[in-house]
Amino acid sequence: MTATIPPTRALSAGNGTPVAGGQAPARRRPDAGPWHAWKRRLPLMPALAYMIVVTQVPFLVTLWYSLRSWNLLVPGSNRFAGLAEYRAAFDDPAFRSAALNTLKITASAVVLAMLLGVALALLLNRKFLGRGVVRTMLITPFLLMPVATDLLFKTTIYDSNFGFLDWVLRPLGVGQVNWLGTHAVGSLVVVLVWEWAPFMMLIVLAGLQGEDLEALEAARVDGANAVKTFTYITLPHIRRYIELGVLLGSIYIVQTFGDIYVLTAGGPGTATTNLPYYLYEQVFNNFTVGVGAAAGVIVVILTEVVATFALRLFSGLLEASAGAV
Amino acid sequence: MIKGSNSRARRAVTRLGATGTAVIVLGAAAGAGSAGASTRVPASSSPVTIKIAVVSNPDMETIEALTPYFEKQNPGIKVVYDTLPENSERQLIETDITTHANEFNAVMISNYETPIWAHNGWLVNLSAYTAHDPSYDVNDLLKPIRDALSVNGQLYSVPFYGESSAVYYRKDLFAAAHLKMPLHPTWAQIASFAQKLNNPAKGVAGICLRGQNGWGENLAALDTVINTWGGEWFNMKWQPQLTSPAVESATNFYVNLVRKYGEPGASNDGFTECLNDYNAGKAAMWYDATVAAGSFTGAQNDAKGSIFANTGYAYAPVGPAHIPSGWLYTWSLSIPSGTANEAATWKFLSWATSKQYEQLDASKNGWAAVPPGTRMSLYNNPNYKKFAFANITLHSILSANPDQPTKAKVPYVGVQFVDIPQFVALGTEVSNQISAAIAGTESVKAALATSESDAQTVARTSGLEK
Amino acid sequence: MAVTTVGPPPGRTRWARWAHRKWDLRAGFWTGLTWVVALVLFFPVLWMVLTSFKTEHTAYTYPPRFVFSPTLYQYGQVFNGVQNFVHPLEHSIFVTLVSTGLVLLLAVPAAYSLAIRPVKRSKDVLFFFLTTKMLPYVAAIVPIYVVAKDLGLLDNDWTLVVLYTAMNLPVAVWMVRSFLVEVPRGLLEAARIDGASTWTEVTRVVLPMIMPGLAATALICGIFAWNEFFFAQSLTATNGPTMSVFLVSSIQTEGLYWAQLSAAATVASLPVVLAGWIAQKQLVRGLSLGALK
């Protein structure tokens, strides 16, 4: 079904650099001028305007709120407060711990999901009986509605009395463990990894399938063992795909909210409160709009800094994969 | 959408209600609400839909199932429920009320929110309605409950059910272990029973206690323990007292009890989870809301050998300071000021909290299942009096003292909460800490130290501290 | 999709035949291992489906039961119970379909402009779209809530349509663009030389060629919209809860609920799971924002 038309790939090398490189200038018609540039931009405008209005304007309003000491529960509290709310956010140990938790949860989930994803992709990258069925089974966790996954793990799997995990581990002398209490971060990460490993697997699999078979064959003939073949031939080849998977996975997982909301409600204590959940609590539990907005602005600024680097990486990856794939 | 037709004038008045001072605005907002109702809905032309946000629990399940009877009696009114677990429901309703979104015609709140919100002018004064409705018999409502829902003698919320806290225990397990539960136990006795009855090998915990975060969850139970240990949230100068010896000792007791002899996974358990555990025979005792009695397996027909038949009842245990420790709580229904169809909404509210509803519920589900703790007439009803839990519920409610919940005089009202708007945030923070201590990821000392500093911030920023 | 065939080298000598047999054994081992791993990872899904056919009582037995007499009671409750899924299902379908349609309507022209008729700063625009995916949308919920409230659009499907469109638009622009750059330039040139207008060029040449790509894009956007929880949770109440919100809110209303929860979760997940199974080859492209095929 994929519209892969091999001969045109070379032509489309303008991928990511539509103006600077590639064929665009060569095809530019003689009537190109400011008016035509606008005409060309015209189809882009609705989408661009839409995104600016829906995503940027609320953030500007958030910026405005962040300068006010607004607590919805206290009438008359909506007053200009300068930078006081920023100070309150920085002073809140829960905010700092949320930042740290975000890093901890995102990094461990992404890395573990990627490790599992690579392993699964390697297992799948062979011809064997029932390959299609196995792949279908493996991508299912990603397709399940995340809050459904969370509810099921919370109840039928993690429950300390009737949970499936309890039954599996009891012969090993581990029983009646409060998974979501005593091991909250670990239990949350397990669910995230279960949800995201298929995503990583698919991306790495795409990389493996573009692998140079002749090189592999040559290595095998030369007597290189599996580990060596993997390290020296396969890994360098799929490195960019791994980077891409890590980048995209991080973009999604850093926003984790529903999983935390359902599984742990940020607890116990603040052990699993990440930044999105912290912001949510500030607004929808504490109703301290000012502090929530200030913390939100800080998070946006941090995100922008990280995003700048991430995008540079992504841009490089795109140009590389456009050539490679 | 009903809200689409909000008149600008009415919206302005509601805004005023948000920012103006209490007394003047109360009348204005209430007036605006009814004015809006009369202008927008042409009299009885099309059916009115009433949206109600409620907390999910067995009694609400029942009323949802019985609502068709109300709709049949009142053909012009249709009732729609938004049912959510407690923590989510609070967030939803508070967002709605504080932003004056007026999504709901009626909301289920408690004796924590009612006085604060009434004071802010966010709720409709219901005394105006009850005064003209003798059949509602407002004086039949239990006095502590009625007082807790009133400001300056005016009622702002009508109770759907009222509760205190009590101990449930399995008579069969106690008999097998040759133990006897006193009617007025101490926490020391409870701890020793829990130790003897705790049997992890058989999957039976000595006691089920709430550990889930949320000020309405683990804090409700813990606060009663703190009170009867003589501890307090704030002293008369609004200085936080969460690291005082009494609070620390009480918290240590509670956390150790549930960690040693409590249900596994306690840090995730609230009322619902404990009810499930207890009904599944997974706990020998349970300290929780008196309302649970009607939801025990077998309560509908008092079946032999059922959990209901095997359950004994005792008053909330007391600690070293010997202060009666049952809490006072009621889930009640209020009308946010400025919403449409106020009169129709009142019609539903008065039905849901009436004697007639009790009759209807009893005829369908048996008397044990009737929403308890609101009306004296229920406790005079021989059909209801025969239940062992009825008397304990009544007397626990009547003896709860929200004005002086602990040993020393305190500047706040409330047994298991502090009646200030900031308590939602503070209580949640503290309950997070407690649930971490119960999970064992934090020490009680550290949990209380963090809580104390949170309380200090609240006292300082809210200008309460003198 | 190309399948990597790492078969045994053609064996002629006895040595090679031995190697062949050894390879067979090894292959068997890896195949077995793959199946075991897949079954373990798939198990929670299987367990959900199994539990959905139990009674609540069976669901709460210890040790867990694998053999039991199945019942369709829970599914009956999901569709006919006091709190049933019918309305949330309708909301989810409406919001998913409309937002996905809107996304395509906005994304195709934008992607066309970016891929086929790029101008200065097109690349910046492309990356602007991507940055919006990285913003912590939770931070913007108060303004969104207040605006929705003032417009009387709380608890309304259209609010979610607007937000889901914004949520998926960047993904769609990137994806559609990646399909568009593959359209042979020669065809476009030919069409233009024949005097075709831009409109004809797009409708007659470009769109038919990227149809499969648009289907893949729609699928991905549909999955994200269907599964979304945060906005739905924050902005809907009685009128317009979607499946994800309803699933979370409908639990815990009764004493025992695991079996019913499992049935509800199965129903809630089924459309997306089926769509994903059928279109699994397009998944990877969508998930990598069109960077991979």
Image: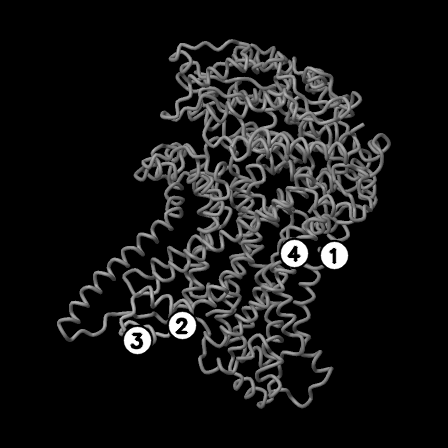
Numbered disc in front, either 4 or 1:
4
Q: In this view, does C192 lie above or below C226?
A: below
Secondary element at tag 4: helix
Q: Earlier in the sequence, mark 1 or mark 3?
A: 1
Numbered disc in front, either 1 or 2:
2
Labelled pair 2, 3 in contact (Cβ < 8 Å): no
The residues bearing labels 1 and 3 have C-alpha atoms spaced at a distance of 59 Å
Determine crowd level at label 3: few under 14, some 14-19, many 20+ residues with C-alpha closer than 10 A.
few
Give the farthest residue toward the left.
Answer: C14
Chain letter of mark 4 equals A
Q: Can residue B140 be seen in this view?
A: no
Residue under the image location 50 percent in, 22 percent down:
B257
- The tag on residue A210 is 2
**Residue type indicated by callout 4:** Leu
Q: In this view, does B199 lie above or below A201?
A: above
Q: Earlier in the sequence, mark 4 or mark 3?
A: 3
Numbered disc in front, either 2 or 4:
4
Q: In this view, does B16 lie to the left or right of C105?
A: right
Secondary element at tag 3: helix
The residues bearing labels 1 and 2 have C-alpha atoms spaced at a distance of 44 Å
Chain letter of mark 1 equals A
